[in-house]
Amino acid sequence: MTSRVYLDWNATTPPHAEVIAAMLAVLESAWANPSSVHAEGRGARSHVENARAAVAELAGVDPRDIVLTSGGTEANNLALRSAFARTKSAASDPAPGTLLTSRIEHPSITRVAEALEGEGKARVRWLHVQPSGQIDLEDLEHALATEPNVRLLALQAVNHETGVIQPTAEAIALASARGVWVHVDAVQAFGRIDVAGINPACGDGLRVTRSLAAHKIRGPKGIGALVTRADIVLEPVLRGGAQERGIRPGTLDPVAAAGFAVAARHARSGQERYERVAKQRDRLEAGLLRIDPRLAINGSVALRAPHVSNVAFSSWNGPELVAALDLEGVSISSGSACSAGTIEPSPVVTAMHDEARARRSVRFSLGDATSPESIDVALAAIARVFARS
């Protein structure tokens, strides 16, 4: 087999050729420590600040509102941990604040929520999830009105497994009316859909943070950002040097930063490219239905990002189908890449439907370089696998 079909773009995206070129150039010329004050350090620092400016432009904020991190997971941890840090003003109140979130969130949200509750730092109210794959806004409104001391609402813009677009604008409006900080995991949204609904500039007084990761927008792994605001106090998760104003200590990589800058600028036109990807996604789903007329598409009744299809087949176990297609040269997944290797069924599909359906589900995620020919090759491979079952 000389080539493979890669349909796992939600796990990571292949780096763009211009990203690779930029990183190679910096690797040779600006490899110094960007915190050093000498000429080599200042040269490296320029690439870090260039990345900060590019991400700020993508997010529609001032560069001073960008905290560079190791990726989306660290950015999510930083936001949640900061919201429930014990400050001097809160020291006299022994009761933990409330965190509102749901079981369809990425593990870097749900597991931090569980940890905060286990440490006695937060009380977690798990929001109801509709079969559509969206959070229940009525339940959110009820929770905001009845739960004590709500400090944070954490929700994603686009679900990492189903591609379902969450009602973030409506949720932000509900939470902000009560002065609640909202953290949006936007890792799967930037460069793929219109993010105007999660832009905190849409009104004064909104406290909204957002996370993104370079490797989801055809940039390098190991770098991402938390988009914040000047009026939001962040508490470092790590302790060390004064990098990123002491919020995120550690030596920044100018090589990764150079790639991030290119990827962020490329992502500004991503929505238009991904709107065209929807045609390939629809062709894929139509072909899958011909192969297995009894399959179900998870989240199909909701508004979805144009490149994701999460399918519950009628007879195949998800991980077994992933392995069978891998042998045929087609790369897909049965859940979040951060949950790979576990035997548990998808918590997202379980929350939407049930565990049995979750065990039969796999995710196809396309990208702006997915060709019609690759869809044809994938469908032929799937047909061969089903013919043997």
Image (spheres, rainbow, N blue to C red):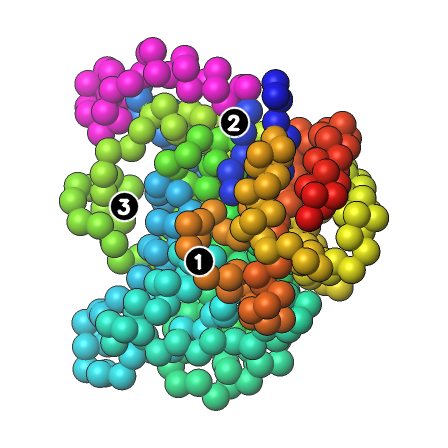
Measure the C-alpha gap from mark 3 to mark 1: 34 Å
Which of these two is toward me, 297 or 243?
Answer: 297
Identity, as a three-letter code, of the amino acid under mark 3: Arg
Residue that carries the numbered disc 2 in the rendered image? 15
Picture coordinates of residue 180, whole percent (x, y): 45, 72
Q: Residues within 10 Å of mark 1 (few under 14, many from 20)?
A: few
Examine the image and state in which quarter residue 114 appears: bottom left
Residue that carries the numbered disc 1 in the rendered image? 343
Picture coordinates of residue 4, whole percent (x, y): 61, 27
In front: mark 1 or mark 2?
1
Q: Are marks 2 and 3 in contact (CB under 8 Å)?
A: no
Q: Which mark is residue 264?
A: none
Which of these two is toward me, 238 or 159?
Answer: 159
| Label located before the other in sequence (2 or 3) | 2
Residue 23 on the magenta span:
yes
- For the question of whether residue 244 can be seen, the reply is yes
| Position of residue 242 in the picture relative to residue 368 (left or right) | left
Measure the C-alpha gap from mark 1 to mark 2: 30 Å
Magenta stretch in the rendered image: 17-42
Identity, as a three-letter code, of the amino acid under mark 2: Pro
Examine the image and state in which quarter residue 385 appears: top right
